[in-house]
């Protein structure tokens, strides 16, 4: 017997798979933990690792069941709500620090997802600023244009919150964002 739309809509499987993905990512990292390192689940972020050298890795896990027409998991898009909500939350964490620059320099910000990041203009621009190919002003101009051309007001506000960071803060922050995609 096939599953009806009502059964599918009321199923917790879509929600629970995100929690399972988060736990499996946590467990995978736990297996590779080194002496003096600590790991947490749903404490400082979805997953976090306190390294022995005092550095911190904040990890947001994002899992999608959505598929494109080819039957593959959808791409992480330039205006992906999960992407921008994650960056927005990290901005808030940074702003709460007594020394935001020192916190950023001591922290890595990672998005782990089964989504594909190919052809994502945001990731392309992020890599450019990380590699010194563009200046902070150019990156801010890109973010302003992205926000101006975004119809979803919540995503627009997330992008704007990221873009208004002081130039030094934004430069440091962008240098510490990384992606683990396609798994």
Image (cartoon, grey):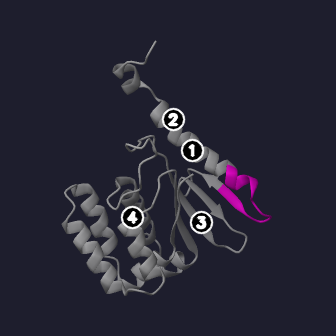
Q: Which mark sits nearer the N-terminus, 2 or 1?
A: 2
Report x, y in % for residue 159: 30, 66
Q: Which mark sits nearer the N-terminus, 1 or 4?
A: 1
Can residue 75 be seen in this snapshot?
Answer: yes
> Is residue 73 located in the magenta-colored stretch of the structure?
no
Left-right relation of 137 to 90: left
Q: Which mark sits nearer the N-terminus, 1 or 3?
A: 1
- Label annotation for residue 21: 1
Q: Nearer the viewer, mark 1 or mark 4?
A: 4
The residue that label 2 is drawn on is 16
The residue that label 4 is drawn on is 120
Q: Which mark sits nearer the N-terminus, 3 or 2?
A: 2
Label 1 neighbour load within 10 Å: few <14, some 14-19, many 20+ = some
Asked if disc 3 and disc 4 are in contact, CB closer than 8 Å, the reply is no
Q: Which mark sits nearer the N-terminus, 2 or 4?
A: 2
- Label annotation for residue 57: 3
Q: Quadrant of residue 83?
A: bottom left
């Amino acid at each position: 017997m096939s599953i009806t739309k009502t059964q599918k809509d009321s199923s917790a499987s879509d929600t629970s798979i995100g929690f399972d993905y988060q736990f499996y990512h946590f467990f995978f990292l736990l297996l590779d933990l080194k002496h003096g390192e600590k790991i947490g689940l749903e404490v400082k972020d979805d997953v976090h690792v306190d390294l022995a050298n005092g550095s911190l890795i904040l990890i947001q896990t994002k899992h999608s069941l959505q598929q494109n027409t080819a039957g593959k998991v959808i791409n992480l898009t330039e205006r992906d709500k999960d992407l921008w909500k994650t960056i927005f939350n990290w901005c808030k964490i940074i702003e709460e620090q007594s020394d935001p620059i020192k916190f950023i320099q001591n922290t890595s910000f990672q998005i782990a997802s089964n989504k594909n990041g190919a052809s994502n203009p945001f990731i392309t621009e992020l890599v450019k600023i990380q590699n010194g190919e563009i200046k902070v002003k150019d990156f801010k101009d890109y973010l302003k244009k992205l926000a101006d051309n975004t119809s979803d007001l919540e995503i627009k506000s997330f992008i704007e919150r990221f873009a208004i960071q002081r130039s030094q803060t934004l430069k440091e922050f962008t240098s510490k964002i990384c992606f683990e995609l396609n798994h």
